[in-house]
Amino acid sequence: MIDKKDEAFLGQNIKGIMMTLIARWNGQMDAARANTEFADVRPADMRLFAQLRGRTVRLSEIHREMGFSRQAAQQAVERLIRHDMVSLDADPNSKRDKIVSITDKGQRWRTLAAEQIRLIETEISETLGETGTEDLRRSLLALAAR
């Protein structure tokens, strides 16, 4: 049974708050693509695309970073290939791995996404101020580096 202390903690824990914010921001990103050439790309596939963050990356790294199976990552990448957002090439340093690269169409989405992310960061700055926003960024980078 959950006591009052746990109830308060679970209601305001950092992970839960971050999940709420991520869901809100993902909704804003999905709305931004609604009337574009990217409208028919699955939201989950767009999340994987976002994880690339402009990098050329090994398929094996994607599934580890995203925390799901290699097969699920492969399927999402294949769907993004069908949408011409990424390409997949053999890794010259590995017989088994593949390299995922962003195509010209994928770069067009990155341009639109950057506009939306700037709006999100403006919203954060309006709430936290510039110093608070940069403190948050530094803190999140430190946590991600662990």
Image: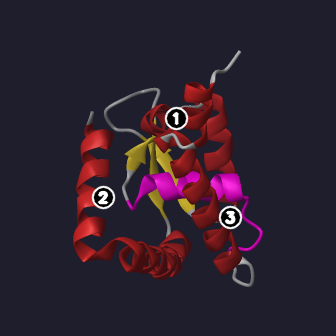
Q: Is residue 89 left or right of residue 6?
A: left
Residue in the image at 32% along x and 42% along y: 144
Amino acid type at image mark 3: His
Neighbor class of circle 3 (other Cα within 10 Å; few <14, some 14-19, many 20+) is: some
Amino acid type at image mark 2: Leu
Report helix, strand or loop for mark 2. helix
Q: Is residue 98 above or below residue 4?
A: below
**Residue situated in front as seen by the camera: 139 or 1:** 1
Residue in the image at 74% along x and 84% along y: 35
Q: Where is residue 112? Give x, y as percent.
A: 52, 80
Question: Which residue is label 3 attached to?
Answer: 83
Q: Is residue 67 magenta?
A: no
Residue in the image at 74% along x and 74% along y: 39
Q: Where is residue 137? Give x, y as percent.
A: 29, 59
Question: Which residue is label 2 attached to?
Answer: 136
Disc sitting over residue 63 in the figure: 1
Q: Nearer the viewer, mark 3 or mark 2?
A: 2
Report helix, strand or loop for mark 1. helix
Residue in the image at 23% along x and 55% along y: 138
Neighbor class of circle 2 (other Cα within 10 Å; few <14, some 14-19, many 20+) is: some
Q: Quadrant of residue 99?
A: top left
Q: Report the span colored magenta.
A: 38-54
